[in-house]
Image: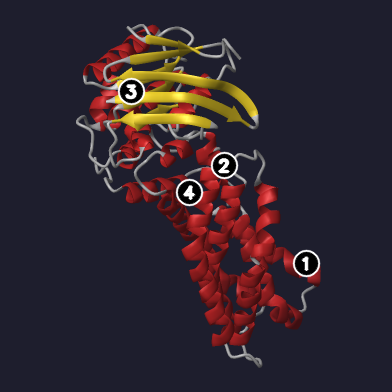
Amino acid sequence: MRLAATDLTLERGGRLIFSHLSFSLEGGEALAVTGANGAGKSSLLRALAGLLTPASGRIELLPKTDTPRPEAIHYLGHTDALKGVLTLTENLAFWSAMLAIKPGIKTIDEILRRFGLQTVKDLPAAYLSAGQRRRAALARLLLAPRPLWLLDEPLTALDLASQALLKDVMREHLGGGGLIVAATHAGLGLPAHELKIGAAA
Amino acid sequence: MSAARSPLRALFQREWRIGRRVGGTGSMGVVFFLILVSIIPFAVGPDLVLLARIGPALLWIAALLATLLGLDRLFQGDDDDGSLDLLLMSETPLEAVVFVKCLVHWLLTGVPLVVAAPVFSVMLGLEPKAIFGVTISLLAGTPALTLIGAIGAALTVGFGRGGLLLAILILPLCVPVLIFGVSAAQAASGGTVPFMTPFVILSALSLAALALAPFAAALALRQARI
């Protein structure tokens, strides 16, 4: 699988964010998107996810299939998509049913255990700490098998052990032929191509 | 664990739980309805003949306002926490998502109003025939209120405090439902118009809203992303 962006120009609210950006990424590779605050890292990820229409240029996930691009993508934004009144298990069970036609290989309990959340699985998500909520959002990545992961600042709010865990999870995903595009300030901690945006603008 | 595999069933379950738990707007609508109906006699005076005459109209306006309450949260909550982005990226069509969310909103807001309407009608001194008319017209009309409101909720998503704007956008569009709802309710207790004439049009409004509103709201939600 290959992700290709050609001559990409993004605008938001009439303001040019960046122009004529091109890159491509093969299966098993990671891309770290860096740049100053407001350079357009998050906007690039949203455009790749199909949540923002580029002003010009093309984004393709090759080889072409019948499934629309967003359905081959896990998008992890700044928000955690957890409902505070629902328990963690209820939250994840919902996303598991919503995001995957085929259930993932692992059960929700296994995924919760992997992310160290089994002790809080029956608590309403509103009671969780920022780091726990972040880990729960990351756990969503394993609920449904999707080849391209778009991660916006994935290491935010995570302690060192969780950061190491996330690196393991990302390494496994890449090992299985998956692709990762991550916006990051701190670096991903694994071999990755680097794309610096905003330098010209 | 009984994980619901069907996406729409899972969505229904989730919306239902959110609506029913603490902080949900599920039971708020009917309480608001009760308060509106009970303060009206304080304003117009305890004249039972007058109350019985304007009762159907009062109940319909109260139902309209009670439906609007909490409707601005229909998509706003999902937009705030990023769920909406993920719903857009799921295999399930957004139109179906909108439909399920409206269905749950109606079950938690509209149906309690219909159930409570006979009780509140008695408070306003309505006759049995009029009570039947109000109840059955609310049953036929409240789906249209929820569905039309969903379009407004989708249009005002991301506006921070969209509640007031939603009411301004939606109330004029609800006028046909109000007109035929009230005339059906009044026709039930006698008058020159047969009951079925306004009632069939009211039902048609609900069916048309059912057919169109999910598409309109989904379109508005997709546009709001860009």
Q: Nearer the viewer, mark 1 or mark 4?
A: 4
The crowd level at tag 2 (other Cα within 10 Å; few <14, some 14-19, many 20+) is: some
Q: Are marks 2 and 1 in contact (CB under 8 Å)?
A: no
Secondary structure beneath dot 4 equals helix
For marks 1 and 4, give the CA distance. Answer: 32 Å
2 or 1: tag closer to the N-terminus: 1
Is the residue A81 above or below the residue A4 in the image? below
Q: Residue at x 38, y 47 (%)?
A: B11
Q: Is residue A112 visible?
A: yes
Of residue A69 and residue B74, the one placed in the foreground of this image is: A69
Q: Is residue B24 visible?
A: no
Q: Give residue B19's mark.
A: 4
Q: Is residue A73 left or right of residue B214?
A: left
For marks 3 and 2, give the CA distance. Answer: 34 Å
Residue for badge 3: A117
Residue for badge 2: B224
Chain ID of residue with mark 2:
B
Which amino acid lies under the numbered mark 1 shown in the image of this protein? Answer: Phe
Q: Residue at x 38, y 15 (%)?
A: A31
Q: Nearer the viewer, mark 4 or mark 2?
A: 2
Let me know if marks 1 and 3 both belong to one chain: no
Is the residue B178 above or below the residue A148 in the image? below
Which amino acid lies under the numbered mark 4 shown in the image of this protein? Answer: Gly
Find residue B9 and report its horizontal and vertical position in percent: 33, 51
Residue for badge 1: B42
